[in-house]
């Protein structure tokens, strides 16, 4: 059996305090019959993120303008598809996502059990569970997805995900920009891609600052809700693969 080529996409904005340690751990990670290639995506960081990346790898993307989390991740998806990777993993650059769970994340892809695999902190409710406000928002999106799609996703904001080549073709055409993870659930489901959640034990952010902060939580909820409804209506009733 040939090796599965997997690209690990790491969107980075001001992650100089975290990205070096993360890349060191990824470079050391070995999984049987899987070839892992980390791809940091520097989204115009203002700190020493790019220098920390260059110390450890020559394979990275340095975006000329700030695209935000969605644009940075989609740049990685396009790189994976263009370079014929079998699968891609989305991994935050802040140290929250457990490196030792990568093997479990890609196993359902190897076994053809799903097109997208999401690491959820809420299945077994172990590890860092986020703030009360964030948990309330995640529960809201879980109920919204169930109402619209009949699908139960316990951690729709999780950025710890694996996609197979079939899913990569969809996200190369279109991927939500500012807060993509909850909206992408609708995109995947209405493109007839199967989703599987696995339990993971996430860590607390190791440094830096989250892009979703308490003062913007109401804005986040409203914007993402509208984004979810927009994608749902366009795909559900127009029958188009991408909502543009």
Image: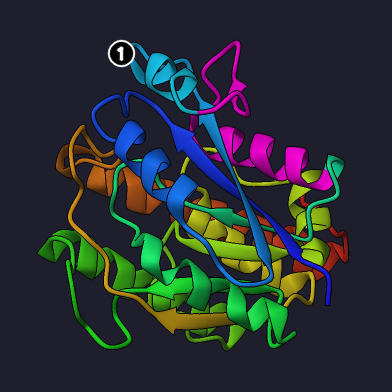
Question: Residue 120: where, in percent of width, then height?
Answer: 38, 75
Whether residue 46 is visible: yes
Q: Which residues are magenta?
A: 57-81
In x, y percent, where is residue 54?
A: 48, 18
**Count of numbered circles on the image:** 1
Q: Is residue 185 left or right of residue 118?
A: right
In the depicted view, which residue is nearer to us: 188 or 101?
A: 101
Q: Is residue 94 magenta?
A: no
Q: Quadrant of residue 107?
A: bottom right
Above or below for 1 versus 53:
below
Question: Mark 1 falls on what kind of element?
Answer: loop
Q: Is residue 11 left or right of residue 88?
A: left
Q: Is residue 211 visible to us here?
A: no
Q: Is residue 70 magenta?
A: yes
Asked whether, in this view, residue 20 is left or right of residue 186, the answer is left
Q: Position of residue 81 (x, y in %)?
A: 82, 47
Quadrant, the N terminus: bottom right
């Amino acid at each position: 059996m040939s090796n599965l080529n997997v690209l690990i996409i790491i969107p980075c904005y001001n992650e100089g305090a975290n990205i070096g340690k993360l890349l060191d751990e990824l470079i050391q990670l070995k999984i049987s019959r899987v070839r892992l290639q980390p791809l940091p995506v520097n989204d115009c960081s203002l700190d020493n993120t790019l220098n920390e990346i260059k110390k450890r790898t020559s394979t990275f993307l340095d975006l000329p303008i700030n695209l935000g989390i969605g644009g940075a991740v989609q740049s990685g998806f396009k790189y994976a598809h263009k370079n014929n990777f079998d699968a891609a993993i989305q991994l935050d650059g802040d140290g929250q996502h457990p490196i030792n769970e990568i093997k479990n994340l890609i196993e359902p892809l190897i076994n053809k059990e799903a097109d997208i695999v999401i690491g959820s902190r809420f299945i077994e409710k172990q590890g860092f569970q986020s703030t009360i406000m964030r948990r309330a928002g995640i529960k809201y999106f879980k109920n919204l997805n169930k109402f619209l799609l009949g699908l139960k996703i316990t951690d729709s904001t999780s950025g710890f995900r694996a996609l197979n080549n079939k899913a990569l073709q969809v996200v190369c055409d279109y991927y939500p920009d500012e807060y993509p993870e909850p909206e992408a659930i609708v995109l995947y489901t209405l493109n007839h891609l199967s989703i599987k959640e696995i339990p993971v034990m996430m860590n607390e952010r190791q440094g830096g600052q989250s892009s979703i902060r308490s003062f913007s939580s109401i804005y986040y909820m409203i914007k993402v809700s509208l984004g979810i409804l927009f994608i749902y209506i366009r795909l559900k009733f127009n029958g188009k693969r991408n909502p543009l």
